[in-house]
């Protein structure tokens, strides 16, 4: 198996990444092919599809670390489920699967075709094994059951004080609000006093959560 491309996203770390693809459609990322695969012919016809599948590697998972059962965040980190009944990164083979929107294909003279995507739940620098078109008539199953994850989970009210929201680009600030609204904290954390930190789009973000409201306390540029 060879890596064919790399994802570039606003998340340099795992903390804060949406737990599923498509949860935050506003998130913008790019897929840049490795030099061996920078052929426009390899993506001919892909522009006719609105969504694509990315098959990628959980590259930050320690090698050899897996367990038959895991604690899904959705269940508060307390109940165990079989690893194959979850999307945990701690698997025998650390392979991830994401369905993302293909916004456009940019053809670069030096980097070949670059895929501009939205809705990815992937860390910056993640290697990609394969790309396939999403085909609704076969990939969509409206009557499918969702087990212990029937919906997208809790949505928080997010407050970013005006002076902080102006530190970054308005569109990036709006995307940050959508990311934070999905509650990036571990689900077993419920302290109203704890300050959390995450990196996003070149900025360090600090926040706390009280009841159902998340308040940003600091946004600073990462030097």
Image: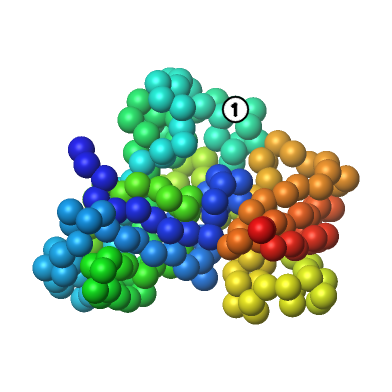
Residue at image point 32% right, 61% down: 32
Q: Quadrant of the C terminus?
A: bottom right
The answer to whether residue 184 of the structure is visible from this angle is yes
User: Does 169 sit above or below residue 19?
Assistant: below
Q: Which residue is mark 1?
A: 79
Place of residue 80 in the rendered image (x, y in percent of width and height, measured from the top left): 55, 25
The answer to whether residue 50 of the structure is visible from this angle is no
Residue at image point 42% right, 33% down: 85
Place of residue 1 in the rendered image (x, y in percent of width and height, measured from the top left): 20, 38
Res 218 quadrant in image: bottom right
Colour convention of the picture: rainbow
Residue located farthest toward the left when viewing the structure as drawn:
41
Q: Is residue 24 left or right of residue 95?
A: right
Give whichever of 44, 144 is nearer the camera: 44
User: Does 91 sit above or below residue 112?
Assistant: above
Identify the element where label 1 is drawn: loop
């Amino acid at each position: 198996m060879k890596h064919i491309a790399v994802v570039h996203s606003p998340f340099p770390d795992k903390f804060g990444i949406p737990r599923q693809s498509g949860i935050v459609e506003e998130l913008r990322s790019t897929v840049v092919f490795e030099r061996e695969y920078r052929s426009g012919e390899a993506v001919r016809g892909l522009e006719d599809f609105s969504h694509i599948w990315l098959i990628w590697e959980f590259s930050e998972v320690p090698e050899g670390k897996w367990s038959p059962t895991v604690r899904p965040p959705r269940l508060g980190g307390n109940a165990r489920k079989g690893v194959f009944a979850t999307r945990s990164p701690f698997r025998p083979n650390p392979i991830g699967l994401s369905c993302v929107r293909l916004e456009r294909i940019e053809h670069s003279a030096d980097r070949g075709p670059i895929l501009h995507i939205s809705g990815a739940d992937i860390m910056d620098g993640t290697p990609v094994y394969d790309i396939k078109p999403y085909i609704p008539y076969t990939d969509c199953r409206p009557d499918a059951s969702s087990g212990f994850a029937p919906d997208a989970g809790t949505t928080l009210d997010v407050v970013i004080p005006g002076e902080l929201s102006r530190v970054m680009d308005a569109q990036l600030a709006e995307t940050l609000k959508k990311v934070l609204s999905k509650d990036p904290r571990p689900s077993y954390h419920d302290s109203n006093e704890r300050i959390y930190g995450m990196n996003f789009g070149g900025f360090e973000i600090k926040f706390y959560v009280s009841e159902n409201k998340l308040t940003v306390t600091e946004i600073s540029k990462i030097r």
